[in-house]
Structure formats: C-alpha cells, structure tokens
Image: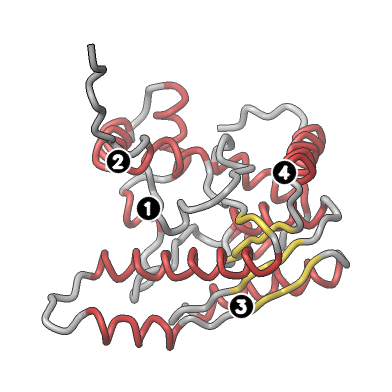
Amino acid sequence: MNRIKDYEKLKFDIDRWLKDYYYFHSIKSFVVGVSGGIDSAVVSTLCAETGLPTYILTMPLHSKEENTELSDLHASKLVDKYPNVTIVNVDLSKTYDAFMDTVYEGFTINPLANANTKSRLRMVTLYQIAGSVGGIVVGTGNKVEDYGIGFYTKYGDGGVDIAPIADLYKTEVWELGKRLGVDQRIIDALPTDGLWDDDRKDEDQIGASYEQLEEAMEKGTGNAIEILEKFNRQNKHKMEPIPTFKLEKLS
C-alpha cells in the first residue's frame, strides 16, 4: 500500500513537524531506541536529519546476533554522518535476568509476559536517558501496528511521547527508508520484534504479511480481514483510552 506521491515532501513535512514540536515544548533532545529494524532506522534518521540533539540507544537484551549487528551498524552510520547524534549502548541482559530471578519465585513462567517485560525494560531505559538529557522518547510504531492490530507492548514500545511514522503503512516506511539512505540489509530484513528466544518473525506471530494487513485496513478486502479484526478486537485495550469510572453529575 503506497499512498505517498512525493517522498521528498513527506521528509520535509515530518522534519518540520519534529522541529515545531521540539521548539514549542522547549525540548532539549530526541531519544530513539534502535532495534535493527526498518521502523526504528527510519525514525532515528528523521530525528538525526533535523540537526537537533539526538540520542540513539542500542539496548541488546539476549538479542539475536543479526539484530545486534544491524542496530550497531545503523547507529554507527548515523553518528558518522550527523554531528548532532550521540550513541548510547545499554546491555539489559543482566538486568532482565536479575529481574526475572526476583519476580518468578513461586510463579509459573509465561513466555508472552517475558517478551513484554523485555520491551518494558527498554521503555524504562529510554525514559531514564530522556530524563537525564531533557529529551522526549520518539516512537517507532507504524500505522498497522499502532492503529490496526495493536502489535506492540502496552507501556513498552507503546510508551512514547511522539509518533512520527504512526500514520504510515509499513510499505511506506520501507519506501521512505530507501529515500533516507537506510542500509539495504535493514530494508531487506524480515520484520521481527526480537523479543522471543526463538527466531520468530512478525508474520509468524500475526499470521499475515504487512501488505495483506494494509489491504484489509485501507480497502476492506483481501485474505487478512479476519486476522485484522481479531487482533484489533483483542488489543483494543491498548489502542483506546484507559476505561475510567465516572461519577454521575450531582443534581
């Protein structure tokens, strides 16, 4: 799905949007976590291109070697090209292990809860650094993940301050990445959240490709409509405001 006619204009518009937010709110820096995937590569590059102080965090956590290599490669290219970029590497593996040893005494291990905890530890790390440098955490979710199927961790990678690509479909993010000069290995890599002990990809977890989900969202057609509706329904609690008990108006 590609709705974008002019990617140079899109780059300019996002750049202006980021700068407007930065100056209006008197922010001192952007803070972005990079995973080795296309979404975080695009967002971190967009932030770097503003010329404003940008902190790029790599946060390995028992990560696959491929993901670590790609995130390190991307971060290194950014810091070499943009003088406003600072790389921060925080290995969270020991922190995660210590946390799990503490909380799982007497409780059954839940692989999904473990995966979500990894994402939440990264969120805490991003906000710790952001608090230290007067920054905001910049989100890396795309339209399918954030508003279609809720494919993110609540208070994990969903815990951000601004979301510059959340109205772009994944295929549009790939195309924008090409225009931004993102390394071809990152563009070609199969999407994965990197939170599991095995090598499962996003499509393995979802049961449909991003292209199929985009067709279902945009046109209401294709083979992924039922999958889209199922994930949207079960993850609605992530995408809507927290339910709040309201006092009845006193007469």
The circle drawn on residue 25 is: 4
C-beta proximity under 8 Å, tags 2 and 3: no
At x 40%, y 52%, the residue is: 152
Is 5 situated above or below 250?
below
Q: Quadrant of residue 38?
A: bottom right
Disc 2 to disc 3, C-alpha distance: 34 Å
Disc 2 to disc 4, C-alpha distance: 29 Å
C-beta proximity under 8 Å, tags 4 and 3: no
Nearer-N-terminus badge (2/3):
3
Q: Position of residue 99 (x, y in %)?
A: 33, 81
The circle drawn on residue 69 is: 3
Q: Nearer the viewer, mark 3 or mark 1?
A: 1
Nearer-N-terminus badge (2/4):
4
Amino acid at pointer 3: Glu
The circle drawn on residue 154 is: 1
Near-viewer residue (11 or 132): 132
Q: Nearer the viewer, mark 2 or mark 4?
A: 4
Q: Nearer the viewer, mark 4 or mark 1?
A: 4
Mark 2 lies on a secondary structure that is helix
C-beta proximity under 8 Å, tags 2 and 1: yes
Q: Position of residue 140 (x, y in %)?
A: 57, 52
Nearer-N-terminus badge (3/1):
3
Please give the residue where the numbered disc 2 appears in the rendered image. 237
Task: For label 3, count other residues whose C-alpha is less than 10 Å away and answer few (under 14), some (14-19) or many (20+).
Answer: some
Question: How many numbered marks are there?
Answer: 4
Near-viewer residue (173 or 30): 30
Amino acid at pointer 2: His
Amino acid at pointer 1: Lys
Near-viewer residue (146 or 94): 94
Disc 2 to disc 1, C-alpha distance: 9 Å
Q: Quadrant of residue 68?
A: bottom right
Mark 1 lies on a secondary structure that is loop
